[in-house]
Amino acid sequence: MKSMPALALGAILLFLSYAKLSAQKTDSLPRYYWVSFIDKAQSPYSIDRPGEFLSERAIARRKKWNIPATEQDLPPNPAYISQLSSAGAQVLQQSRWLNAATVVIKESELETIRALPFVDTVFYAGRPYEVSGRRKMNFRMDSLLSKPVEGEPYGYAAAQAKLLRADTLLAMGYDGKGVLVAVLDGGFIGVEESPFFDSIRSGGRLISPRDFVDGDDNPFESSTHGTKVLSTMAANVPGVFIGTAPGASFACIKTEDTRGEYRIEECHWVVGLEYADSIGADVVNSSLGYTTFSDRKMDYAYANLDGKSSVASQAADIAVSKGMIVISSAGNEGNSNWKHIGVPADASRVLAVGATDIKGERASFSSLGPTADGRIKPDVAAPGAWVAVADAFSFRVSMGSGTSFAAPILAGMVASLWQAFPDKSNQEVIDAVRQSASQADKPDNELGYGLPDFAKAYQILSKKQNRASGIPQK
């Protein structure tokens, strides 16, 4: 065998040296990890003292539906959290339902965490970003820039509201009053200033904001996506733009990091959903979905869309078991090679929402089902192509497209319907929405059960209520 030229050998040695240094540098960088625990043994928390981890409103909701606090509701054992910190991890968040914590730690120190006797599983969730100034634009307090529509209370949102018969419920006085809607999103720029949200601010109905990305109580920055999503429900400027639940209360919860896409956002989503439960939310809207990531090794395969593979999908089903209604956008991948719905729309108990145009025809971008285990998805549909949304920086209506808007339009309607029947369980309301829809007799994997008719859903629940009261049916 011929000897290698000295120049080539030197190049290889230089490359190996560089690779070794790069690996050492990578190992020394902090990373996000999800760490789950084997049990909640010897916890100082007790199901007999739910006030330590649930608000009065949340406890009242549980009592109303006879849903007792269980060990699943208890926070992770503080002794476990303390030992994670002692092992060098920075503990960011904790999940009650999945008995886990999100931590930041160097990869080179991770084995110390894995070796702890109470640790069950660990998975890589992403990398922290450098701290940078948060994006928060100044709202221009101009006069109204969108000319009112005469004789039309919903204004520019009339077509999308009437496609679901929202006008019928509003005419009867049902606008979501008394219902708390949690909105999990990526940021809510302008919500604190925009006249579209005057009524929820002045009425004390913009409550309990939280930012799980930056760890504070200010979600009103970073992105306008949540602002537009919220407007489809909460806007209340008659003749210009009225949302589908203008009388409801809203909790803006930021779980999405707009600087990239990593599974840490699913971890944020889980604790955001648990926070919604803890403050007593009734309805949760999530116009977020996860399929592919900045780190392609994290990408989901179609086989993962079984409602069980993702921590977000697991948590979503648990939330419904706690008495809430969770509504998720199906996704905008209908025209892509992926085509399928995303996480957590694959969860079995979530109402996944596809999008139609204003004529009620499926929007081509709306993601398709079924789930990997053969379940129909999306569950229902709502208008989401060229629908009215609030501009985040000025007092005018703009247009937007995406299942991101179909989901909250439907969520607002669900809140208004539930206001009309506060003694109906979440599952009864969900069933009525499905039964009222345009394809109830023949659901498919494009629009699910179809476009709900909320006047019909009202009639369905009225008949059930009358039967339960012994009132003769016509």
Image (spheres, rainbow, N blue to C red):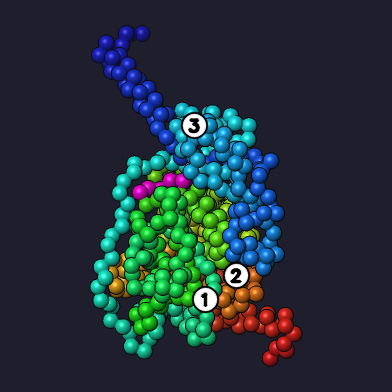
Query: Residue 341: where, in percent of width, then height?
Result: 49, 58
Could you tell me which residue is drawn at 51 percent across and 46 percent down? 93
Q: Residues within 10 Å of mark 3 (few under 14, many from 20)?
A: some
Res 294 → quadrant = top left
Which one is nearer the viewer's eye here, 60 or 281?
A: 60
Give above or below for 459 relative to 401: below
Query: Residue 291: where, in percent of width, then height?
Result: 46, 51
Closest to the camera, between mark 2 and mark 1, is 1
The amino acid type found where label 1 is placed reads Lys
Which one is nearer the viewer's eye here, 442 or 116?
A: 116
Which image quarter holds the N terminus?
top left
Q: Is residue 394 left or right of residue 433?
A: left
Which image quarter holds the C terminus?
bottom right
Q: Which residue is mark 2?
A: 430
Element under label 1? loop
The amino acid type found where label 3 is placed reads Gly
Element under label 3? loop
Res 472 → quadrant = bottom right
Res 392 → quadrant = bottom left
Could you tell me which residue is drawn at 70 percent across and 54 percent down? 48
Q: State if disc 2 and disc 3 touch (CB < 8 Å).
A: no
Residue 177 marker: 1
